Image (cartoon, rainbow, N blue to C red):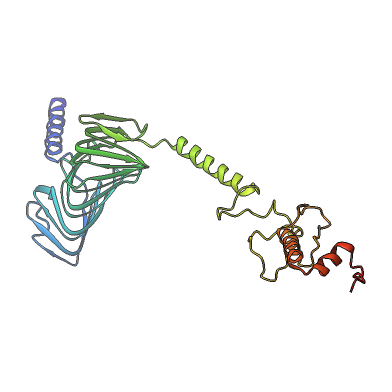
Amino acid sequence: MRRAGSKTRIIVLLILYVVASMLPAWSERITFSANSMTGTAGNSSDTTTLSGSAYVLTSSMEIAADSITMSGKNFRYIEADGNITGKNIEANMEFTCGRLSYDRETKIATLKDNVHLADTENGVSVDAQLIEYNQNTDIARIQIGITIKQKDNVCSSAYAVYRKKNQMLEMSGNSQITQGEDTFRAQEITLNLDTQEIRLDGRVKGSVVDDKSADQDTGIKKDSAARDESDPSKDDGSGKDDGSGKDDGSGKNDGSGKNDGSGKNDGSGKNDGSGKNEVPADGTASLGKSPDAGQGKAASGAEGANAPPDTLSRAKTGGGKRGTDD
């Protein structure tokens, strides 16, 4: 009896082992919804298509699209089309695209047409036309029209590999990284997204702006402008003095060099027409004789030469009486 009981236990264990080996190791629950569904329900080997606000949720992937098709054994393959939004739950990666295919066994998702992939955990965003993401290795292979952003980095290339676990970005084919005003170009570029260390290989080019020098130049210009504004002795740029060194005009000519036509001076030290020279009280006028006074004397001399004898005699004698000879 003991031998029969032990044989029975062995047979039961073998049956359980065979049944367990027949179940797929990647089996998981699938939840789905849509406006309509076509296909054979309950037969996992057939194809089932969800149309209109289609939605599928697995343990690792969430997908919403215009239409979703599930096919293969145990619905291994999922294909979506039109206005796709989704999230890789395990990797914490969100995405949008035009078309998608997902292999539930290998856990590889291929995103096509205007793809946007966001690693919300590390602040990395990727835009391209084709991205293949392996959920097991956390590696994304990116192609066509690539733009990758992270912090101040803006990267572009023909082909790129994003290693999420290691936070490494490898680019090839006309690769370029822009960091603010700094630009680096090469055939191959490797960027450590944690340390921001860059490695460039093949036809390396770049341009770097020294922020410190730019700040110093700006500071010098500001200081110079402040000094110019605070210095009252500097000209205002109009070619005229600012008035700080001018006299009040009480004893100087107006600078025009012209007489007012009346024959009289404006009082700045020239003759006023009376034959007398006036000296301003401040003493700034010239003490020399005016040209008008000189001309007056010359005129008197001429008149004296042409005057009659009696007039001349009277002028010499101070205006005395003529003789009584007549």
The residue under the point 73% across, 55% down is 247
Q: Position of residue 30 (x, y in %)?
A: 21, 52
**In this view, which residue lies farthest toward the bottom?**
326
Would residue 48 appear left or right of 326 to someone viewing this image? left
Location of residue 10 (image quadrant): top left
The one nearer the camera, 133 or 58, is 133
Q: Position of residue 304 (x, y in %)?
A: 77, 64
Location of residue 36 (image quadrant): bottom left
Image position of 204 with respect to 47: above or below: above
**In this view, which residue lies farthest toward the left?**
46
The quadrant of the rendering that contains the N terminus is: top left
The one nearer the camera, 168 or 49, is 168
Location of residue 22 (image quadrant): top left
The quadrant of the rendering that contains the C terminus is: bottom right
How many badges with numbers are in the image?
0
Q: Position of residue 225 (x, y in %)?
A: 56, 46
Q: Position of residue 251 (x, y in %)?
A: 76, 58
Residue 6 visible, this angle:
yes
The residue under the point 66% across, 70% down is 261
The one nearer the camera, 318 or 154, is 318
Image position of 268 with respect to 200: above or below: below
Residue 268 visible, this angle:
no
**In this view, which residue lies farthest toward the top?**
3
The one nearer the camera, 192 or 212, is 212
Would residue 323 appear left or right of 252 to someone viewing this image? right
